[in-house]
Amino acid sequence: MALILINNTGNKHNNYIRQAKYVNNPHLDGMEEDILYHFSLSTKTHDLPQMFGDVKFVCVGGSPNRMRTFAEYIHEQLEMPSNTADIKDICEGTDRYSMYKVGPVLSISHGVGVPSISIMLHELIKLLYHARCRGVIIFRIGTSGGIGLAAGTIVITDKAVDSFFRPQFEQVVLGKVITRSTELDVDIAQELLQYSSELTDMPTVFANTMCTHDFYEGQGRLDGALCSFSTEEKFEYLRKASKAGVRNIEMESSVFAAMCHVCNLKAAVVCVTLLNRFEGDQISTPHDILMEYQQRPQRLVAHLIKKRLGLIS
Amino acid sequence: MALILINNTGNKHNNYIRQAKYVNNPHLDGMEEDILYHFSLSTKTHDLPQMFGDVKFVCVGGSPNRMRTFAEYIHEQLEMPSNTADIKDICEGTDRYSMYKVGPVLSISHGVGVPSISIMLHELIKLLYHARCRGVIIFRIGTSGGIGLAAGTIVITDKAVDSFFRPQFEQVVLGKVITRSTELDVDIAQELLQYSSELTDMPTVFANTMCTHDFYEGQGRLDGALCSFSTEEKFEYLRKASKAGVRNIEMESSVFAAMCHVCNLKAAVVCVTLLNRFEGDQISTPHDILMEYQQRPQRLVAHLIKKRLGLIS
């Protein structure tokens, strides 16, 4: 099967033109070897251009099992000739992250929270650079808590905002705080929104996503080991978030948007809501329904990939 | 084998007296069910007092494989009669965290970074509360980058400090920043320091540990996908850290110390250094040597557990 990259406007290889390099670090070129420690890969022990040179789509999500399932799903969707049992964890030398490659698609787990995904992104972006990849699009396909949305709704992120509803990410560099934009690719987001209407069971909104560094106190949950606020104070905070255009809360989008933006990587965040936070804090939905919800971002992104590869019109 | 808890001074059951409860949340008692979602456990579906009531020591670390290895090691050290193959992952219903129980010892993985360990700690502290545990001691046994120390040195944390060398942790609660103390248990730290001298290949210091939210820019590494500073600026920052008493850098100690302190849980942080950051950024030490380094915190903490259980004098 020949996979040809077709961009938004139908022009082949247009993405190869005007492609700035992904890394932004003058020190890298002087290094004899680059060990991607948390992937258990290295420029000396692995032929990264040979292994990854054809990657065009990267999909990332928190859970290793979910990203394995996604790799199997995309394998089926792209009608790959090989057996799904042959899909191996490329990072099997470590248990920090899992990585699967299916044709031009890379599926990687990133764990929970900003620090965990940030390590993965540093090493992924270096991997794409070393492998001389071009025109790559990256998607975070995740789960989240909804703000005033029915469980199972997909939120395509407009702006990734912090706990104060600001569209920025604060990074500490050598003990100084610097602020980065969390701008995402508008065209990809609009393309996803359009495709969502072509699929069944895919209720979708385009809205702001709040990224917190904590699941319990930081998201106004009343059910953590620690809680110092009242039910009314919780609802007041959620209403404020809603007024700021926030429709879901998760824990990775801000650094994901910020790093991809600085590194010239086109990025989108597609998360499903597992509950409506105005109705509760605990995730008590039955397992099989949660599983179906988690497949929704996968199905939507797979649909875009198939369109871009010219497999469906 | 009878395991009897003996405290520091040799008095049995002294820890059971004056034990404040671990959780600090008035809402919990009104809940009909508590789903510990990221552990795939619940007060309704699991008999938590029966499963966990005898837990006296909790050991946590980033990697699931390492915490499985620790469970097998402590099984051998406590001379448990059962087979190590019978040690099952209690959280097998999820891949977020792994949890193993060996007699009075619980071994749990927490992933990478403050947000990831904070979710685990919320649910662990609620688990200990629901299971009516008392007199529990918790250890983080991890890896870190060293500041002016030979690789393989153990750092028992005095103060967990942030990127600005302050012994505090900033938590955002409903959009407001609150500051928590990162005080750890001095007696446990001193006990560990004393035992380190009884063991071979256990170079140990008692010093400050810096907790960052990023592995690359946040720790002054020159080898990330992004780097905007010079080699000299990196060394200047590391020298400042050293002057502030910091001897190692990792990514979880501050919230670990802060949450355990607020929740009346005696806590210690024991990390081995994998490299000396004054000599480089990449972790290039051979795999088998890294494996031996990673066992050092495990051996030290296992030694304390055996002392406390009266298995060695």
Image (cartoon, coloured by chain):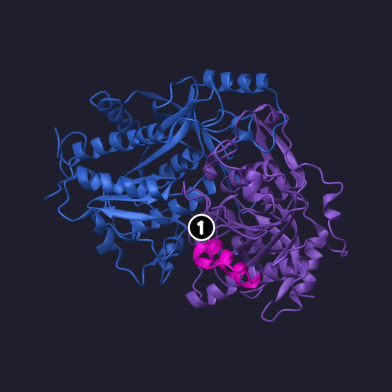
Chain colours: A purple, B blue
Give the x, y percent position of residue B239: 57, 18
Which residues lie in the magenta part?
A: A66-87
Give the residue pinned by disc 1.
Answer: A88
Give the x, y percent position of residue A56: 72, 56
Q: Quadrant of the C terminus of chain B?
A: top left
Give the x, y percent position of residue A70: 58, 66
A146 shown above or below B115:
below
B210 shown above or below B88:
above
Position of A275 with respect to B5 (left or right) is right
- Name the residue type under label 1: Lys
What secondary structure is marked by label 1?
loop
Q: Is residue A82 magenta?
A: yes
Give the x, y percent position of residue B119: 48, 54
Residue ranking furthest to the bottom: A200
Q: Is residue B172 magenta?
A: no
* Residue A244 shows in this picture: yes
